[in-house]
Image (tube, coloured by chain):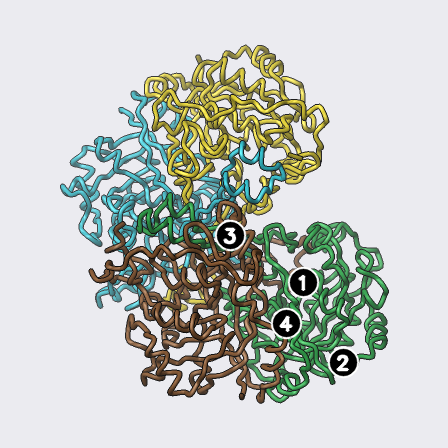
Chain colours: A cyan, B yellow, C green, D brown
């Protein structure tokens, strides 16, 4: 196995020799769900009506924050492994209708009724999106033991696909690492550590509770609309130790980042090019979001909120776009 | 102009001769927004923080209703004018990765790290979606006078596109016409009248208020997952008179239906194949939703609720998919 | 296994009970190529320079026949199993460039330099095309034993894909079954038999030679440009016995038909929904063409010709579109 | 108008100040065809049966040269203005069929009948292709005065689209500029001059005749399969003076290059970012090919040949892929 020198995610960073010291961890197997043999949503089982009502009742404002990015041709996205960049095209235009008359309505109608139609195509991991459990498995099996050979059809996964994701409702916590560091944006390729996470929480006097939706801000969104190459070429993200603390110690329900992959890139594990992904999705059943727009919350110093995420129910898919909402709450 | 005999929307219904009596209405021009010369969202300007907070405060339950449909190959959609049906395809699979090794990680890594990626393409009016103001204009101009020749680029509209749609939050009202008629689903091609709407509201003792989100149920969703041809071939919907009452008299903010086009098909106006669309979008600046899943609300007899709709911000687009949420409220 | 009543290829024809009598033939295994363990083109190995020169030298006219169909939105194609219909869209238009200025050249340049760009998408088996050996295998293996688990990556087959197909040059023979029967088009769902093939050849005093390119005309092209449903709903084609005679007895190099699947549909073998395909591709290494336009040759009574076919080299693909050429020759 | 500093075609080259001296040429209007008011193919009208037969009769070998490139994910293509890169995806796989059973044939059939299907999408100017006359116009009109407002529908051009291109048959002449210079590949961004063209012809003792197909080799294909960025970032090509000599003085029928745009990039005309394109297509009615694979001809020192090009008939399109063939001839 020689991953050294390869360019993953467009990052021109080679592993340090030290990166190769880690041995294959034989315990890295897809996890077994405590919610039953047919469970396909893992930690999202923590969503419940009692908690929902408590959160709704804690709202004290009509102000809402939009956590989704725009979709447009040329937007930053992960295409390093050949996936299609976002495409948009017109299928009907007012002038085109008049020339083509595919309505067979004739020119007097076509010149009056000005129809615009359009279509899009995208890698499911484009723009603000949530990774379904099917996105990463270990040794051919996704979370809860569903095996590709048995459940992966040409139309996607029959288990663990994005159509299973319920409306995601939970208490949201913003860990604004960039702001804690006093920066607009973290340094290029900065690796967020457990200490960073704990210190940022302490500074803001935030306590993570079981079932929380934890969003981590690097500030990378600064480049989203202005410099796609700068956005996708920056591997800033959180490390595995910090992820494990959030998941294993604090019991978060789901996570999100404003960067491309949530976790820091490139991987420091020579045997796994996305160890955070396999840890969260395959081992722990924790779905997470990428490319979440956190600038509004950061500017307004909102660190605690009702989070609402409504991913499209793309059958069998490994991810789904969504436009999350945050509504500030008070404890 | 000869629309007679053409097959619009896959409906094999020819216009009656009477259908041709209506003359071109010279007042059918794109409307001028009272919200200013640059306004691109029309009635959605009615969304406001005060109203939001009142709605949040009226929630008394943690139960939520999912109003979005699944996306899958073969799903019912409007392809009569050549638009692409929903497509889904896999770009990365656990076995495919091992054969292709496009990660350049080698087999020991590829057989451990089981990656699934996928992509989708769709007409923007596929599945549960909201029509942006750019979708239909009159005489080359969309609502508020934005002209195609000036604002329609090859990447969509520079004014009135879906990226402008804010998080849609409002009081939702379900007008369950099928239930009012004592039916699972309205008769094929049934045209919902103003009297139907008013009687259904009266029966449920519902009052529409200015700024409401009004959803109209035909019961057609019965066929959505089971018979695409039956779904798309059924022109059941609301007529123009009823739409005008809701919009002009009652001041609704936005509308939604569980059918393909909200309005009844085919058109009874020989000079306009979608008169409800041009009336709502171009003349009144009222965006609306189609293919909204209303079965859950209907079964639970929920007629009044907080409506939350978060359409993807597809830049320049004539529509955007969304997965709306309804949370019951009490006055 | 119950294929009865299913709708394959949009044909509303149920199998007769007699169709179920055939038992699984244990000899139906992917064939071994006499051209070596790495051979990926089967019978196309018969193409050779000596034969080419003899054919070129037999040309006595400058008249050429175009055997390819047009590609357009709404064209007849096989979408019964969910494959995408042909799509075409504009990416750049003269007016759109002026509005969007994505060239950053400014309006004086954009209004002078009128740029049109466009894109297409299609199932590889759309329009006139040739099936690569990778299209159908038996028990997971394509012709010459290449196994999907070893050679099928997410970017197609590493063996047997369309990029391996050489320029197809050979003596072409038209078997005009419709004309032989005195018909413009064969009866709906007519099954062409060995006797039909032999009689048509005899009538035209044609002898098939080893290495020939044999094209079979049903007349179905009559509907290609006018009635897509009529085209795709008609299962007219050749039966397996006739195919076997052409391949096993006469040694043809490749075949083509003017219909959707070359072979008659639906299958009369309850254990194989496309027995002609698996026989030709998987067992015999014989690629073949579908949707070949034979009207010009038929009208001009040209039955013998130089055939030139230049499929696009789509890497890894199961088929490739092409626009074949026929040039009459004299023996 | 400020094109300075913009990145066209991914070239990081700024115009020299001298580049701005050229004034707008008021004679740059779309040309009028001598072949009549409805002519849509310009110089390809020179193709005729007499010439074809003469060329066929001049063949003395069975050896053929394949001038087409492969299509694959990651192939070099022009995406600088947002056009979609080539995509390939599987729609049916042997294992996927077994899991999904969309044939409804059941596992015993699906495990026997191993079906592979796939689809592609591409900008029409991807891989070896020919530009149709509709690709570039001047002041809204393409060659022969067809105006976008009258003829450009949402499904492409009703005049001048690629479906009109006949089988392209002509005498081919290779101008191997790289070889003439004693190089594998011309220097980066080298601009081929009239003197280069004339000298290369003289060295090979070649005479261009009216109606010839002239192919110009830069050697850039060296990078096509190995370094996409190097291929698309190199603006090597022919200048306008040389093009004019070939077209106006020598009367060539069509041209082709092994580079991205035939002409040298970036443009030296500040008022036209592709002056060779508008000159050839809009003014002269000369279609031309790009990304033609000329390595085989060059290695074999074949400079004169029968050229056969059979572009797919993509209705309304601005270009079409093809896989040309060259067969050496002797005068």
Q: Which of the two discs, 4 and 3, sits closer to the camera?
A: 3
For label 2, the crowd category at 10 Å Cα-Cα, with few meaning under 14, some 14 to 19 and many 20 or more, is some
Same-chain check, marks 4 and 2:
yes
Quadrant location of residue A182? top left
Q: CA distance from mark 1 to mark 3?
A: 32 Å
For label 4, the crowd category at 10 Å Cα-Cα, with few meaning under 14, some 14 to 19 and many 20 or more, is many
Q: Secondary structure at mark 1?
A: loop
Question: What is the chain identity of the residue bearing mark 2?
Answer: C
Q: Which residue is mark 2?
A: C208
Q: Quadrant of the N terminus of chain B?
A: top right
Question: What is the chain identity of the residue bearing mark 1?
Answer: C
Same-chain check, marks 4 and 3:
no
Q: Which residue is mark 1?
A: C291
Q: Is residue A321 left or right of residue A193?
A: right
Q: Which residue is mark 3?
A: D146
Disc on the earlier residue, 4 or 2: 2
Residue at image x 44%, y 70%? Answer: D247
Examine the rendering and report whether any part of residue A133 can be seen: no
Q: Which residue is mark 4?
A: C325
Same-chain check, marks 1 and 3:
no
Quadrant location of residue C247? bottom right
Q: Nearer the viewer, residue A28 or A273?
A: A273
Given contact means CB atoms under 8 Å apart, are the residues at marks 1 and 2 in contact? no
The single residue placed furthest to the left in the displayed view is A182
Q: CA distance from mark 2 to mark 3?
A: 48 Å
Examine the rendering and report whether any part of residue B161 can be seen: yes
Q: Position of residue D281 (x, y in %)?
A: 45, 61
Q: Nearer the viewer, residue C306 or B259?
A: C306
């Amino acid at each position: 196995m020689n991953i050294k020198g390869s360019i993953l995610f467009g990052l021109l960073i080679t592993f340090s020799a030290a990166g190769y010291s880690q041995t294959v961890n034989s315990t890295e197997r897809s996890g077994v769900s405590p919610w039953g043999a047919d469970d396909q949503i893992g930690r999202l089982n923590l969503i419940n009506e009692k908690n929902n009502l408590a959160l709704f009742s804690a709202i004290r404002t009509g102000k809402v924050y939009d956590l989704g990015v725009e979709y447009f041709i040329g937007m930053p996205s992960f295409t390093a492994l050949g996936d299609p960049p976002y495409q948009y095209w017109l299928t009907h235009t007012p002038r085109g209708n008049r020339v083509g008359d595919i309505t067979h309505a004739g020119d007097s109608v076509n010149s009056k009724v000005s129809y615009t139609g359009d279509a899009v195509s995208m890698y499911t991991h484009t723009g603000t999106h949530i990774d379904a459990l099917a996105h990463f498995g270990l040794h051919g099996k996704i979370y809860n033991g569903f095996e590709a050979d048995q459940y992966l059809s040409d139309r996607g996964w029959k288990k663990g696909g994005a159509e299973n994701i319920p409306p995601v409702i939970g208490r949201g916590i913003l860990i604004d690492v960039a702001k804690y560091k006093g920066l607009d944006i973290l340094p290029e390729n900065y690796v967020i550590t457990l200490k960073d996470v704990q210190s940022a929480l302490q500074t803001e006097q935030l306590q993570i509770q079981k079932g929380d939706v934890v969003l981590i801000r690097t500030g990378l969104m600064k480049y989203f609309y202005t410099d796609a190459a700068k956005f996708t070429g920056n591997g800033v993200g959180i490390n595995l130790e910090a992820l494990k603390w959030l998941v294993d110690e604090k019991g978060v329900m789901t996570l999100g980042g404003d960067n491309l992959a949530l976790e820091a890139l490139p991987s420091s594990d020579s045997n796994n090019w996305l160890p955070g992904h396999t840890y969260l999705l395959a081992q722990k059943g924790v779905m997470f979001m990428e490319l979440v727009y956190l600038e509004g919350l950061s500017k307004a110093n909102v660190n605690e909120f009702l989070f609402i995420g409504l991913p499209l129910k793309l059958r069998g898919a490994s991810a789904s776009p969504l436009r999350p909402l945050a509504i500030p709450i008070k404890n």
